[in-house]
Image (cartoon, rainbow, N blue to C red):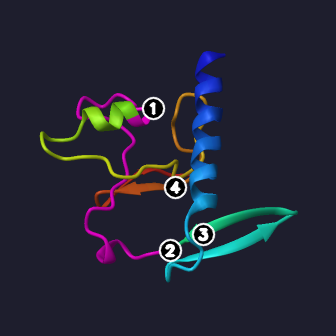
């Protein structure tokens, strides 16, 4: 139950952050679906070399939250921005396709 609440709060926070992104940015556009507004930002990974996806830590365990992601960063590196980048089952395995670091880590 507690894990589900944390996951829902994380999703809500990610959505809130996404909705407050400046829609005038070249890579972002405001959209609406079923009366709900949201912002979609699209960029190629080559445009932002620091862009990264995390799922598991170095030991293979699921990170699960942004605090855990921060704990994997090398000394002197900061997490400037983070948000949920997909849909996950309660155990944090991806619902659909997950590709990171040039490898496919999950398929639907």
Q: Which quadrant of the structure image shows residue 19? A: bottom right
40 w.r.t. 2: above or below: below
Q: Position of residue 51 (x, y in %)?
A: 33, 61
Mark 2 burial class by Cα count in 10 Å: few <14, some 14-19, many 20+: few
Residue at 33%, 37% in the rendered image:
69
User: Is there a contact, CB below 8 Å, between mark 2 and mark 3?
Assistant: yes
Q: Which quadrant of the structure image shows residue 89? A: top right
* Outermost residue, bottom side: 26
107 and 29: which is toward the camera: 29
The Cα atoms of the two marked residues, 4 and 1, are separated by: 17 Å
Mark 1 burial class by Cα count in 10 Å: few <14, some 14-19, many 20+: some
Residue at mark 1:
64
Secondary structure beneath dot 3 equals: strand
88 w.r.t. 91: above or below: below
Residue at 44%, 75% in the rendered image:
43
User: Is there a contact, CB below 8 Å, between mark 1 and mark 2?
Assistant: no
Span of residues in magenta: 42-66
The Cα atoms of the two marked residues, 4 and 2, are separated by: 17 Å
Residue at mark 4:
97
Is 38 covered by the magenta stretch?
Answer: no
Q: Main secondary structure of the magenta part?
A: loop
Secondary structure beneath dot 2 equals: loop
- Direction from residue 41 to residue 37 in the image, left or right: right
* Outermost residue, left side: 75
Secondary structure beneath dot 4 equals: loop
- Direction from residue 11 to residue 63 in the image, left or right: left
Q: Residue 42 carries which label?
A: 2
18 and 90: which is toward the camera: 18
Residue at mark 3:
40
Mark 3 burial class by Cα count in 10 Å: few <14, some 14-19, many 20+: few
């Amino acid at each position: 139950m507690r894990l589900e609440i944390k996951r829902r709060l994380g999703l809500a926070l990610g959505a809130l952050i996404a909705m407050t992104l400046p829609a005038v940015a070249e890579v972002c556009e405001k959209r609406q679906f079923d009366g709900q507004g949201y912002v979609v930002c699209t960029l190629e990974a080559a445009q932002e070399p620091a862009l990264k996806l995390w799922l598991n830590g170095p030991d293979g365990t699921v990170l699960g939250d942004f605090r855990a992601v921060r704990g994997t960063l090398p000394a002197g590196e900061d997490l400037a921005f983070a948000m949920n980048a997909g849909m996950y089952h309660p155990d944090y395995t991806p619902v659909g396709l997950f590709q990171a670091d040039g490898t496919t880590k999950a398929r639907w």
